[in-house]
Image: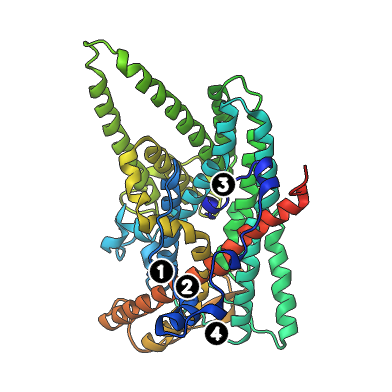
Amino acid sequence: MDDEKSFNLLSQEEIYSFTPILPHRHRRSWRKTPLTTRGLFTLLLKPLLPSFIFTSPPVPLHSTSYLDGLRGIAALIVYMDHFVLNWFYPLRNGYLSSPTDTSILQLPIIRLLFAGRASVGVFFVISGFVLSHKPLSQLRSGNRSAVLQTLSSSVFRRSMRLFLPILFGTFISMNLAYNGYFTPVPSRGELIPPILPSYKAQVKHWWFYFLEIAFPFWDRGVDPNRAYGSPYNGHLWTIPIEFYGSMVVFLTVVAGSGARGEKTRMAGTMGLAGWSLRRGRWDVFSFLGGMVLAEWSLIRAGEGERERLLSHHEDADMNLQPRVKVLLKVLNGLLLLLALFLLSYAGESPSPGFYHAFLIPCTPALWEPIFLGREHYWLTLGSLLLVFTLTNSPTLQRPFTTSFAQYLGRISYSLYIIHGMVLFTIGTYMQERYTGQVGEDKWVDNGFGELVEAVVRVEKVGFEPGSWGFVRAWAAAGIVCTVVVFWATDLFWRGVDRGCVAGARWVEGVFVGRGRS
């Protein structure tokens, strides 16, 4: 879920030789900006506009660039999930899970346009793949000393790469909350940050909850089935789990570094992944599953190279190979459809709907009492299967290597951090103003004699959900929110996220004694 493309792992030699590039070495000083319309535009406006407006040199692709694009598309789907379902929350139910759930948007595969929970599983599988790809490649080449340097670098910088952007993002959220810019969501229980009587109290409250996120080893911080979300950005509940899963991947690479072969190491990792799924830890299964796929991709790359070398010595009667390749492509396409079908599983309603109901008896009993257990079980399997099919097919990878998908991949972490602040300020304000649907934080009885904090609808005037006027208000809010989200995300990516990546490298360089022989 985070921008591993910007988080390339450094070898010890690269760390020692790293020299930060200062802005004045490649940019013209503002004092030398010509006093022309273009010069003043460059000085005053260009830094405030999204980077995709300007022509920039294409970023070179690498062997796993399609995963960056997939992560970017998944982040965009998370944004669409939180926007669409704020207005039409019943869409989270499965198709025909009740007599009223008959929207075409609830059908399998189509509902993936706003399947944010499916995207979380994809995030975790991608992270397991990308974080293990380089050290596994080094193990295959026999360079075990380089593996230790790579893992040392990645472990040292991982917390800074994940939590520093959150520090800045939740600080912005805290200031928005103190000034009263958040508006409750009228149609669902999405809590907003509280407004405290003084700025000092607000800062202390924010700092306490940031530390709760930044220390992921407490009980709820590592349990994805009862995860903790900060009041200043509840969507960040995945980040402590992301950090925990990253450490699991790095430790598993170390444990498997002494294996007698890559297939033995892959079999051991598959065993750990299966055990994790059996124990209800879908998050650990996803990370280790991604590591298995990284090993698989390296094995396939090695076999592909051997095939190219042997192709010059093939016998004339070896004409079955093209048929086998066609059969494998068809099989991979069928697995892709299965992956998309599993990722469409809806777990919010008592029944996942007409098309997925047959999977209920197939769900292991362990997952039944877990919160959203059946949904997480099938979404996790679908996420792993999706990445597996993309790994096998350069054709399926192409949509994710387009310039738009690659741009989304670069800003994906910033998009994940920023979008909630826009949706629960501008988005919910427009929803309340133009539909008359008003939400308010209240303490209500949960049905068991306990008072719990929730968002309840206290007024019902104006457009009814689903009416034409309501849809027009939703479309207008969608245009405004999307423009603001991409603008704010791009600024945050350039001003904060990339700086945090560079800062983590600098801190590591200081720690290891950069420049010393």
**Of pointers 1 and 4, the one earlier in the residue sequence:** 1
Q: In which quarter of the image is residue 191?
A: bottom right
Picture coordinates of residue 291, whole percent (x, y): 54, 37
**In this view, 434 is above or below 12:** below
Residue 85, which numbered label? 1
- Quadrant the C terminus occupies: top right
Foreground mark, 2 or 4?
4
Q: Classify residue 473 by image quadrant.
A: bottom left
Relative placement, left or right, of 456 versus 177 is left
Q: Which residue is drawn at 59% across and 67% down?
A: 23
Q: What residue does disc 3 label? A: 283
Q: Residue 500 in the image: x percent, y percent?
A: 63, 61
**What residue is pinned by disc 2?**
188
Q: Which amino acid does label 1 sit on?
A: Leu
Which of the two discs, 3 and 2, sits closer to the camera? 3
Instruction: Please state which amino acid type lies under the numbered disc 2.
Output: Arg
